[in-house]
């Protein structure tokens, strides 16, 4: 059985603020439409991403991995530490089958264990920025507040199977970010690390 690691990184500069101040709506190159205030007060995603990239590159250079990101603030009764304990036990963060948004609805009703993004980690690559930035912008558009990612789950891509799927309303767009474990009885073989951002 694979032994996974838990790493912690302190990034006090990684803050997300909320506001109720009036601000005109703008559509950013990222694609979301948000109040201009949030764009002017966003974190420095490139700088923060590079700091987290250092951990990923130190431990997974030249490896094929998949990374799942979470914001514990989205789990009202769970702290980051609570979620980490769940992940250690279940190898993913899906703890409540009735939790809204946790079932990964898709047109063909395919079984998906979790969403993640696959990467081949290279020395000069930029990775984590592209995972934490969407958590800021899309929740602002959809729920009127940004999310700060504070947990990353790192998986061995060779121990996962991609589930190609399509979202309702986006028919014809094949998504490859859904995964299941190749060996359901040995999920921990696929879990490489949990990274906590403090």
Image (cartoon, rainbow, N blue to C red):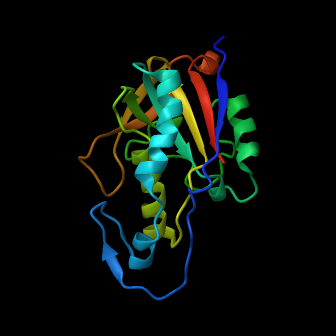
Q: Is residue 51 above or below residue 133?
A: above
Q: Position of residue 121 (x, y in %)?
A: 39, 26
Residue lying farthest bottom? Answer: 22
Residue 39 visible from this viewpoint: yes
Between 21 and 123, the residue placed more toward the observer is: 123
Apparent side of residue 125 relative to residue 12 in the rendered image (left or right) = left
| Residue 12 in picture, x, y percent from top left | 62, 55
Q: Is residue 191 above or below residue 45?
A: above
* Residue lying at the far top of the rendered structure: 1
Q: Is residue 29 left or right of residue 181?
A: left
- Measured along the vertical axis of the image, is residue 7 above or below residue 48? above
Tell me the quarter of the image containing the N terminus. top right
The answer to which image quadrant residue 85 occupies is: top right
Number of marks: 0
Query: Where residue 141 appears, x then y in whole percent?
Result: 43, 70
Q: Position of residue 109 (x, y in %)?
A: 44, 42
96 left or right of 15 in image: right
Q: Residue at x 46, y 27 (%)?
A: 57
Task: Tell which of 193 and 53 is nearer to you.
Answer: 53
Residue at 56% from the left image edge and 51% from the top image edge: 149
Residue drawn at point x = 54 percent, y = 35 percent: 113
Residue 105 visible in image: no
């Amino acid at each position: 059985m694979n032994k996974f690691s838990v790493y912690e990184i302190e990034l006090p500069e990684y803050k997300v603020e909320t506001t109720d101040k009036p601000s005109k709506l703008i559509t950013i190159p990222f694609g979301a439409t948000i109040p201009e205030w949030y764009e002017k007060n966003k974190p420095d995603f490139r700088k923060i991403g590079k700091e987290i990239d250092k951990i990923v590159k130190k431990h997974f250079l030249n490896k094929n991995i998949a990374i799942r990101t979470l914001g514990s603030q989205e789990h009202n009764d769970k702290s980051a530490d609570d979620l980490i304990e769940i992940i250690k036990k279940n190898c993913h963060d899906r703890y409540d089958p009735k939790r809204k948004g946790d079932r990964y609805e898709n047109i063909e009703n395919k079984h998906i264990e979790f969403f993640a993004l696959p990467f081949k980690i290279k020395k000069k690559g930029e990775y984590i920025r592209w995972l934490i930035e969407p958590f800021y912008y899309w929740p602002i558009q959809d729920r009127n507040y940004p999310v700060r990612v504070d947990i990353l789950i790192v998986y061995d891509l060779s121990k996962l199977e991609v589930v190609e799927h399509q979202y309702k309303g986006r028919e014809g767009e094949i998504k490859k970010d859904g995964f299941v474990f190749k060996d359901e009885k040995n999920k921990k073989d696929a879990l490489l690390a949990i990274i906590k951002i403090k």
